[in-house]
Image (spheres, rainbow, N blue to C red):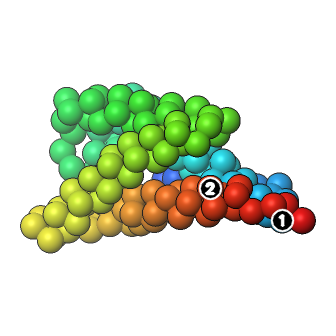
Amino acid sequence: MDKIIAGIFKNFNIVMLAAGIVIGLWTGRPGRRAEQLFRWIVLLGAGVGGFYAGVMHIFFGPMVAAHIGWQPSPFQYEVGVANLAVGLLCVLAFRAGEAFRQAAVIGLACWLWGNAIGHIRQMVVAGNFAPGNAGVWFWTDVLAPLALIILLRLSKSGSRRPVK
């Protein structure tokens, strides 16, 4: 049981992303599935995931740094606060209107894709393939914003079609 719990916390972002997908598919009505997927992924995968990453960087910096393959740094506090800010935007996007959702996704994409570029640089320049640098955290940095952009676009185009 300890290994399962530790595995969940080490891979919290992918667990929350998967939970968002499952709930979004389960609650989505035909014609509204893209919107429901967007809402649950932005809430759980990006919002709750952002809060988790923020708390971890702020309060458990040395452990997080080791997981990423870094040395602890005072900049982790700033990274944590940025995670909290983007996480808050994404939590608010769950119920917000289209313009706010677009702004939240733009902010999320800038933040996570910027992180992904940094992780790629670390892989290439420093050979850092630590789980927190090259594992599921990297892939969710790349794929979560892309999925949200696609779902936001699909839910916008879906809202123009009459529901049957």
Q: Nearer the viewer, mark 1 or mark 2?
A: 2
SS for callout 2:
helix
Graded by Cα atoms within 10 Å as few (under 14), some (14 to 19) or many (20 or more), the crowding at tag 2 reads some
Q: Which residue is mark 1?
A: 30
SS for callout 1:
loop
Residue 156 % position (x, y): 62, 56
Q: Residue 61 vs residue 153: left or right?
A: left
Instruction: Determine the residue located farthest toward the right in the rendered image.
Output: 164
Indicate the quadrant where residue 8 lies. Answer: bottom right
Choose between 97 and 73: the one closer to the eye.
Answer: 97
Residue depicted at 21% across the width and 50% down the height: 70
Q: Which quadrant of the figure contains the N terminus?
A: bottom right
Q: Residue 58 vs residue 140: left or right?
A: left
Residue 158 % position (x, y): 69, 61
Residue depicted at 51% across the width and 31% down the height: 88
Choose between 9 and 112: the one closer to the eye.
Answer: 112
Q: Residue 113 vs residue 156: left or right?
A: left
Residue 139 visible from this viewpoint? yes
Residue 156's disc number? 2
Residue 132 % position (x, y): 35, 57
Indicate the quadrant where residue 162 lies. Answer: bottom right
User: Which residue type carries mark 1?
Assistant: Pro
Residue 54 visible from this viewpoint? no
Above/below status of 10 relative to 59: below
Choose between 38 and 1: the one closer to the eye.
Answer: 38
Residue 58 % position (x, y): 36, 29
Choose between 141 and 161: the one closer to the eye.
Answer: 161
User: Which residue type carries mark 2?
Assistant: Lys
Q: Which quadrant of the figure contains the C terminus?
A: bottom right
